[in-house]
Amino acid sequence: MKLDPQVRKRYPEFETGYAVVSGVTVEQSVPGLEDEKQRVLTELKSKYGGAPVAEIPEIKTYRAFFRAMGTDPSSYRPAPEYLLKRALDDRFPSINNLVDSCLLSTVEHWVVVSAYDLDEIKGEPTVALAGEVEPFELINGRKLSPGQEEVVLRDDEKIIAAYTLGDSSKTKVKYQTSNVLLVFWNAPGIGREAMAKAMETATRYARKYCGGHLEKSEIL
């Protein structure tokens, strides 16, 4: 994966990274991960249960980045905010062992972690700025186009994800998925150390709970 220099020029503190994990087994749930999830969610409730979520510094940071890209964070919630609220309400998402591992890493370290079916990606994926109007289909079936200068992930043929809108249906993780690309995005102000911790956690979960093998990881 590569980072278009224009992204860093427009958002100097933006950080991204990736990991390639092969040979995963995607299942609805695995007992060990469920235990880990409960441990983390208990810690989150202890730390943030009495605080207004909107006043948490990291949430303010993500909301500011959404505004910088022209998106109202009240209409499209940043992933860390959405996940923390769900955690505090005992409604944390349960999708499959791989995606759940990414969501858990996100809420643990304030770094957005997403997984994509590597075999559905054409050419070298690139983190870039959106330009022309380019609608793509989200996992929920809606077709939307990222705003100009929004951070996007794309391959040689299509948009894979847009920072504020979410992930494409074309590269989503399925039960048949074997090889995955994990992508990490911060918001300017969430440091490189958090990025490294999120990468370590997500790749450890992918190995431990999904049976994967880490081929490569890098912060760009």
Image (cartoon, rainbow, N blue to C red):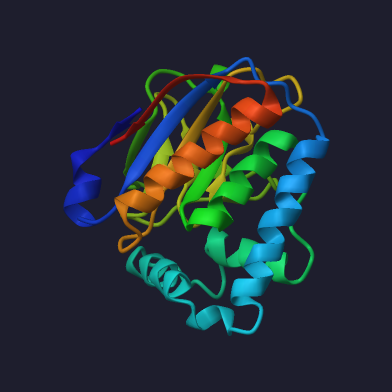
Residue 25 appears left or right of 110: right
- Toward which corner of the image does residue 90 lie, by quadrant? bottom right
* Residue at image coords 28%, 36%: 220
Where 64 falls versus 16 (above or below)?
A: below
Q: In which quadrant of the rendered image does the N terminus lie? A: top left
Residue 23 placement (x, y as % from top left): 63, 15
What residue do we see at 46% from left, 19% from top? 122
- Classify residue 127 by image quadrant: top left
Q: Is residue 80 left or right of residue 90?
A: left
Q: Is residue 135 visible?
A: no
Residue 139: percent from left, percent from top: 66, 43
Residue 188 appears in the picture as rendered:
yes
82 lies above or below 197: below
Residue 10 image point, x, y percent: 21, 55
Residue 86 image offset from top left, x and y in percent: 71, 65
Observer-nearest of 53 and 42: 42
Residue 65, placed above or below residue 111: below
Viewer-closest of 191 and 130: 191
At a point 74% along the width and 58% down the height, the residue shown is: 92
| In-image side of 140 versus 13 (left or right) | right
